[in-house]
Amino acid sequence: MLKCQKEIAKRAKYYLYNYKEIKEKIETAKEDMIMSRKTYFSTLTNQGYYSNPVENAILKFDKEYGEDEKWLRVIDDAYDIVRTENHTKYQFMIKRFYKKEPYWRILNELHIEKSTFYRWEEEIVGLVVMLAIQSKLVQI
């Protein structure tokens, strides 16, 4: 595997394993943005125009969380694809990446072999990478 492919796979794994935490962080940031009580026109700037705090908050949010949101959409798409493809693999995906259960528990509960475990993990990461490329999040 090329170095860039390994780094892309590493990034995909990061978002798979940290999906829940990143989603909660984004939801909290959205709530904070919505709950902020600022007037529409705040202060007159040196350039002679009014700054819009709502637009500024949205631009700041997009700068901080825009890429994370796109990755979460890619992960959501991957969950949808796997759910329609294979129910057992979907359960594996939830247990492995969302719930972060240890591999031995997943092997016992889903009655799969260790080789199947690692093959499915690799397939799911590959799917996420392909969806990220399709969404123009990463380039090869």
Image (spheres, rainbow, N blue to C red):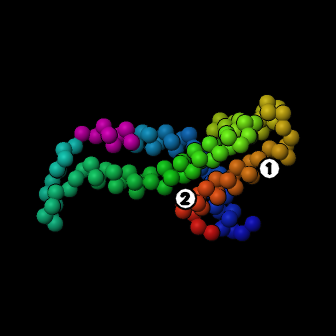
Left/right of residue 63 with respect to residue 92 in the rendered view: left
Residue 109 visible, this angle = yes
Say whether residue 114 is magenta.
no
**Vertical comparison of 29 with 59: above or below:** above
Q: Tell me the distance, in whole angstroms, between the alpha carbons under discs 1 and 2.
A: 24 Å
**Vertical comparison of 63 with 5: above or below:** above
**Vertical comparison of 91 with 68: above or below:** above
Q: Could you tell me which residue is drawn at 53 percent across and 48 percent down?
A: 73
**Vertical comparison of 42 with 32: above or below:** below
- Element carrying mark 1: helix
State which region is magenta.
30-37
Residue 92 visible, this angle = no
Which quadrant: the N terminus?
bottom right
Q: In the rendered image, which residue does mark 1 sit on?
A: 119
Instruction: Say what amino acid the circle numbered 1 marks.
Output: Arg
Left/right of residue 136 with respect to residue 50 in the rendered view: right
Across and down, in percent, residue 35 comes to 30, 37
Q: In the rendered image, which residue does mark 2 sit on?
A: 135
Which is more foreground, mark 1 or mark 2?
A: 2
Q: Could you tell me which residue is drawn at 22 percent across and 53 percent down?
A: 52
Across and down, in percent, residue 112 comes to 84, 38
Across and down, in percent, residue 115 comes to 85, 46
Instruction: Say what amino acid the circle numbered 2 marks.
Output: Ser
Q: Quadrant of residue 18?
A: top right
